[in-house]
Image (cartoon, rainbow, N blue to C red):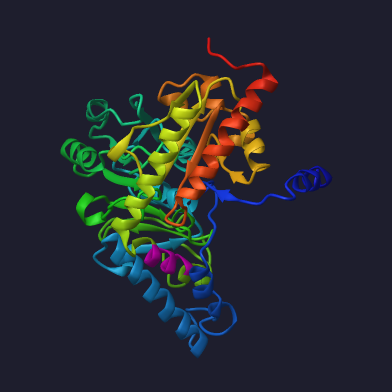
């Protein structure tokens, strides 16, 4: 296996230009974020924030200041509403299990959409062992949740509803405010969680405006370090710990806090919200240039998700008919263009994305999908390079398989 990887890496030697568009799975961390983090490994605030000495007090102060910055960007009332976790997956697990275990006698019904991330979908399936039931609300061909079906599904037994603010694969911006109003009108005691990892720093998102009970955010989705995320818990909402261990400044997540990563998350948030509107316009322009260029240059393609203002500013997801997605990612990689095929959570299982299947894509269309995400750091020259490389890569893959037309 190692030799195979080395051979693949040798095949990449001589690449003159690289364009990294796989932000869904991992980010390139800006130097400003790295520089902000480095002192906290060995210069200052390297202590345990619960201990009574200078490095400990420094760590406590640093974590609280970082939490306050993120709370301000998110629109929290208090910094205590921010709970750091090791990432989006852990925050979603805490949100679902922590709330449901704390309200065992208030209903056993969970409601989600068909296109929630795996870290929501699989948790709800696991919770069936504890007597909970899961109802999946369908979405339309662009990924928008069916609000009428949501209204029909929520009842007095519904303990929790979880709907992502922005879909991580196809960029659909959900009508969260309208959905929450429907839920609370049907059952005021039902808690509402949203995975806002692809909304925070990408679209205007404020927990006070949407009035959600819980919201997940992620560091690497805004070009911060991996290994850190946060769960917003509205003041007054009860959440039980799902892990046991040493409790520090984070009452819902045991263990010694990772101060450098928390600082990195805070710095990445600052950069994401600096010149926010300008950055969003830049990303939307690059997104549309990439989408229009692909549709205009390559035959037999399908855009997955909505167009324009109802789509996240960074998201491009295209199905290339008669072209296997994994083969295309390798072909593009050899030219220095880095993308992902299907969902990051399912790609090694050789299963089509559940999101694409839910919006009506056939299995072969889903397998031929490519996900790309632009950032404020990408340029028009980057997109021009992708649009130069991509048509030739598609033609080559289709030529190898003999699949150049459509049925």
Q: Residue furthest left?
A: 185
Splitting the image into 4 quarters, where does residue 124 fall? top left
Counting from the top left corner in percent of width and height, residue 262 is at 47, 68
43 and 312: which one is in front? 312
**What x and y, as percent, mark residue 54?**
49, 90
Q: Nearer the viewer, residue 74 or 26?
A: 26
Looking at the image, residue 141 sits to the left or right of residue 325; the answer is: left
Front residue of 172 and 146 = 172
Q: Quadrant of the N terminus?
A: top right
Q: Give the percent coordinates (x, y) of residue 27.
A: 53, 55
Residue ID at (40%, 50%): 197
Residue 93 pos. (x, y %): 46, 48
Q: Is residue 297 magenta?
A: no
Q: Is residue 191 visible?
A: yes
* Residue sitting farthest toward the right: 3
Judged left or right of residue 237, residue 265 is right
Observer able to see residue 131: no
Q: Which residues are magenta?
A: 264-271
Q: Residue at x 41, y 81 (%)?
A: 61
**Residue that sits furthest to the top in the current view:** 407
């Amino acid at each position: 296996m190692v030799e195979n990887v080395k051979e693949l890496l040798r095949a990449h030697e001589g690449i003159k230009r690289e364009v990294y568009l796989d932000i869904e799975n991992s980010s390139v961390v800006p130097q400003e974020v790295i520089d902000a983090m480095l002192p906290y490994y060995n210069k200052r605030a390297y202590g345990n924030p619960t201990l009574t000495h200078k490095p400990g007090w420094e760590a406590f102060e640093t974590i609280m200041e970082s939490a306050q910055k993120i709370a301000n960007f998110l629109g929290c009332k208090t910094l205590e509403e921010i709970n750091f976790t090791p990432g989006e997956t852990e925050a979603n697990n805490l949100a679902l299990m922590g709330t449901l275990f704390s309200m065992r006698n208030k209903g056993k019904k969970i409601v989600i959409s068909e296109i929630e991330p795996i870290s929501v979908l699989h948790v709800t399936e696991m919770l069936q062992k504890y007597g909970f039931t899961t109802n999946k609300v369908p979405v339309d061909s662009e990924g928008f949740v069916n609000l009428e079906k949501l209204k029909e599904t929520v009842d007095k037994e519904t303990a929790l509803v979880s709907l992502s603010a922005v879909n991580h694969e196809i960029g659909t911006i959900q009508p969260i405010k309208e959905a929450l109003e429907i839920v609370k009108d049907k059952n005021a005691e039902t808690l509402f969680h949203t995975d806002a990892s692809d909304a925070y720093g990408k679209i205007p998102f404020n927990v006070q405006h949407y009035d959600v009970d819980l919201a997940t955010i992620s560091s690497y989705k805004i070009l911060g370090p991996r290994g850190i995320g946060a769960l917003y818990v509205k003041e007054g909402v009860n959440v039980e710990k799902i892990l046991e261990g040493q409790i520090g400044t984070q009452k819902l997540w045991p263990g010694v806090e990772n101060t450098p990563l928390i600082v990195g998350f805070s710095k990445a948030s600052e950069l994401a919200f600096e010149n926010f509107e300008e950055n969003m316009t830049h990303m939307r322009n690059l997104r549309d240039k990439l989408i229009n260029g692909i549709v205009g240059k390559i035959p037999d393609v399908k855009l997955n998700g909505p167009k324009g203002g109802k789509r996240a500013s960074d998201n491009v997801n295209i199905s290339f008919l008669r072209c296997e997605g994994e083969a295309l990612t390798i072909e593009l990689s050899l030219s220095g263009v880095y993308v992902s095929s299907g969902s990051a959570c399912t790609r090694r299982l050789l299963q089509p994305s559940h999101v694409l299947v839910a919006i009506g894509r056939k299995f072969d269309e889903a397998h031929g999908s490519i996900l790309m995400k632009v950032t404020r750091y990408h340029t028009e020259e980057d997109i021009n390079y992708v649009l130069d490389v991509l048509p030739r890569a598609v033609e080559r893959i289709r030529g190898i398989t003999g699949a150049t037309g459509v049925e």
